[in-house]
Image (cartoon, grey):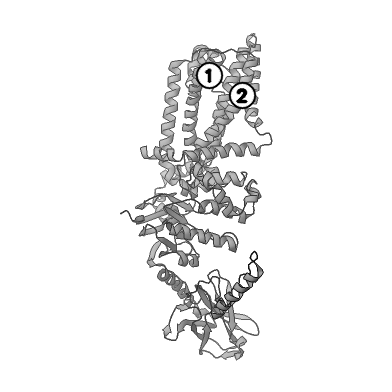
Amino acid sequence: MKEELRELYRYRELLYMLTYRDIKVRYKQSIMGFLWAVLMPVLIVLSGIVVRYAYALVSGRHLGTADIASVAVKSLPWAFLVSSIRFSCNSLIGNQNLVTKVYFPKEIFPVAAVLASLFDLFVASVALVILLLVIQTGWSANLVWAPLLLLMLVVLACGIGMIVSAASLFFRDVKFIVEVLLTFGIFFTPVFFDVRMFGDEGKWLLLNPVSPILEGLSACIARQQPPDLPWLTYSFGFGLAALLGGYVFFKHLEPAFAESI
Amino acid sequence: MPDVALQMEHVYKKFRKGETFNSLRDLIPALTGRMFRQQELSNSDRREFWALQDISFEVKRGEAFGIIGPNGAGKSTMLKLLSRVMKPTRGSIHVNGRVSALIELAAGFHPDLTGRENIHLYGTILGMGRREIDAKFDGIVEFSGLAEFIDTPVKRYSSGMYARLGFSVAAHVDPEVLLVDEVLSVGDYAFQNKCVKRMKEVICGGATVLFVSHNLKTVAAFCHRCLLLEGGRAARIGPADEVISAYLKRSHLAHIADADSKLVAISQVTVRNEHGECARFRSGEKAWIDIELRARKRCSNLSLTLYITDDECQNIFDTSTERLGHGTLTLDEDDVYTCTFGLTLNMATGIFHPSILIYRYDTQTEYDRWAPATTIYVSSHDDVRGTVHCFPKVVRQEIRQASAANLAAMTTDIKEDEECDII
């Protein structure tokens, strides 16, 4: 494994180039260019606001700016997770030529897909920052948690990305299963709602490893509070396990890629 | 073993024939079905086949090594094993040094990116660093001859431009071990020459080169040693010329097997010089081709054609008994006819394939064709290129000096003329 990681490090420039290619191609192909990165999150944020508004109407509460900020802060990372899993799922099949013809560590493909989605997240974050400034959420020292939480999300995305990319190479319908899971995942993840709303039952939602990360982001950015550390440790452990497990899984299957694709 | 660049030891590679399950939808019913029917497992053995069996060879550092063989012999599998994209089922492969593969150029290109971006992308894929590419960038563009179009997306390129750009990038990698597929055949004549020159530079630069090719001319021109693959086995390893002629002989022999079904069959073709059977000639040397025909039924109005193709299957010479003024001939049942063509081989260095065709002159019905019937190697001491040898000599040279005084120019002219005339 040490040898494999050293090799991966030797190919770091390829990772950079493939990420660059993915970004460049995505922005070149769409007429809207950079708007593409913003459109998806904006749609998610808007639908979140609608859901929140309905919730406020039913419970007789007023829809506050804090609610909007919370939905916005959680939507972007969710959009990132969805797009990185979706793109990495296709990353090996979509690069058939390279998989069968040239030798290099193939985990570069799903990782590059995740990094390209991360770039989208940064572009969309600019819009988010403007929104947060407008509605005057304020800020605190708890913001330092944000990059850490984001890193955990990237780790998780890489782990899942490696698993689904390798699996979809062998079984083409894995792609559809992943697509369905991603579509309905939003109902099992606190994006439009908060875990707090469920009271004690909320802990079941937190079992979804993405939940503590999103809740943490919402806490440290929108509510200026520290994240829930025990649950975050759980997410962190899960993410790390996904990364290691995904890597081992990927590397185990890698020799068969060229002849099975 | 520091002088061994590449070593294969008892390499086997197994593939599965037929359709394998590539979706869960098919796999799950198949698996549950298999639990009830045990015999399915034994069936799986029959669906396997060995693409390569017991291949062992060594390539020394700085050597150019060729791998040849008919379609389906396992050349592509070999290439994939060498480039480490696939792993052998059994056996081991050791490579000392950085491997680069010139396989199907432009595999790494993205159509939406510009030539400039693709050079960076493909260069990185081939294992170059960013700084290395920056340093070589101008050289790559110049080599490709695509400077004008370098900021155009490559999807607007013609396929020739695509391949040229691909080769240009690949040619600038400095590998220790280079794998070459059928890639030297891209571009026009001038570009091909450039590629060949570049390949020679790479070989002279001390790199180990492996050619996997159908193009025997390239293999013969570059390689010191060769491996002939047949049905996944190493049929022969040795000096390039020997292995190539062994390969060609096999494909010639395949012809005789089906002679019984023909009305008139070519039964033998041999090439000789004045001393006897021979396959190597000097440019300008005389050669005789003996042909033997057997008729199964009475056939009339026959004419025998001899034509010679070069290694790219281009017809370079064509004649017939009828055209040489001998009229047509008629053979009775079980007649044996022999004929000898005398030729002067005015070809430049290369591999040539004499082919024989027997046909009915008036109806143009073809009875038998043996192409290629045999193979000859022509070599020349003179450094001439191309297909034919015109035995050139420099008879006169002159420099008209534009800048110097006219008088001085004239005197040197005369002097030079005199010197040149002596030659």
Front disc: 1 or 2 = 2
Q: Residue furthest left?
A: B1
Pick whichever of labels 1 and 2 is earlier in the sequence.
2
Q: Quadrant of the N terminus of chain B?
A: bottom left
Which amino acid type is marked by label 1?
Answer: Leu
- In percent of width and height, residue B404 lies at 63, 65
Which mark identifies residue A217? 1
- Neighbourhood count class around disc 1 (C-alpha, 10 Å): few under 14, some 14–19, many 20 upward: many
Residue B392 visible here: no
Which mark identifies residue A126? 2
Tell me where residue B145 sits by quadrant. Answer: bottom right
Q: State which chain disc 1 sits on.
A: A
- In percent of width and height, residue B293 lies at 51, 85
Report the front residue among A52 and A21. A21
What residue sits 57% from the left and 48% below the top? Answer: B138
Q: Is residue B300 above or below residue B78?
A: below
Q: Residue furthest right?
A: A31
Which amino acid type is marked by label 2?
Answer: Val
Q: Is residue A144 above or below residue B322?
A: above
